[in-house]
Image (spheres, grey):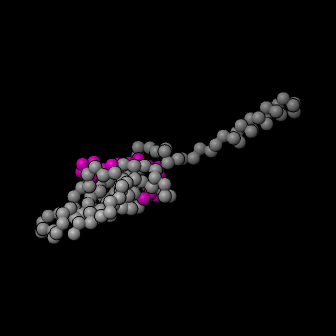
């Protein structure tokens, strides 16, 4: 084997070994994978609940964060009807209110995201009102 060919093959092999492996990151998503749903809050007023009336209502315009392994990977905000949709790669996530208040409980909620699917959730938060 010629010396030039041996050097070329060595350089080519070295280049191959230094290329990082392609692994999915938290930033890579597709628009068919993630979570969507509605977040309600209850009770929506202090005192006893009246017969025939719901004690929960949509949680509007509220910021939440999505964590994976203790690290924030996404943030989202509910719309005026408490609905949201966030795209995420497959995995296990914990969702909670971005700026927790002293009163009430707004997560954490656990959710698993499967490849190619939107996980549908309906979560209810505790307003802390009594």
Q: Residue furthest left?
A: 51
Residue drawn 26% across the image and 51% down it: 60
Q: Residue furthest front?
A: 102
Q: Quadrant of the N terminus?
A: top right
Q: Quadrant of the C terminus?
A: bottom left
Specify whether residue 87 is painted magenta.
yes
Residue drawn 62% across the image and 44% down it: 21
Q: Is residue 9 left or right of residue 24?
A: right
Specify whether residue 110 is painted magenta.
no
Is residue 21 among the parts visible in the rendering? yes
Q: Is residue 43 left or right of residue 73?
A: left
Q: Relative to residue 45, is residue 17 depicted above or below?
A: above
* Residue 27 picture location, percent across and down: 49, 45
Q: Is residue 84 left or right of residue 57?
A: right
Residue drawn 45% across the image and 55% down it: 67
Query: Where does the magenta region start and end?
Result: 77-94
Residue 3: image quadrant is top right
Is residue 118 among the parts visible in the rendering? no
* Residue 104 picture location, percent across and down: 30, 64
* Residue 116 picture location, percent across and down: 44, 49
Q: Is residue 28 left or right of residue 81?
A: right
Q: Identify which residue, 125 or 19, lies in the foreground.
A: 125
Residue drawn 41% across the image and 47% down it: 87
Q: Residue furthest top?
A: 4
* Residue 56 picture location, percent across and down: 22, 62
């Amino acid at each position: 084997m010629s010396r030039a060919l041996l050097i070329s093959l060595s350089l080519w092999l070295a280049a191959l070994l230094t290329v990082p492996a392609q692994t999915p990151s938290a930033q890579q998503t597709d628009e068919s994978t993630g979570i969507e749903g509605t977040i309600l809050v209850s009770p929506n007023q202090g005192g006893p609940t009246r017969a025939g009336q719901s004690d929960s209502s949509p949680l509007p315009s509220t910021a939440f964060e999505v964590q994976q392994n203790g690290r924030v990977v996404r943030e989202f905000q509910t719309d005026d009807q408490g609905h949201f949709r966030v795209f995420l790669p497959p995995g296990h996530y914990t969702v909670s209110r971005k700026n927790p208040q002293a009163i009430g409980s707004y997560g954490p909620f656990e959710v698993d995201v499967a490849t190619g699917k939107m996980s549908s959730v309906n979560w209810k938060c505790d307003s802390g009102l009594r």
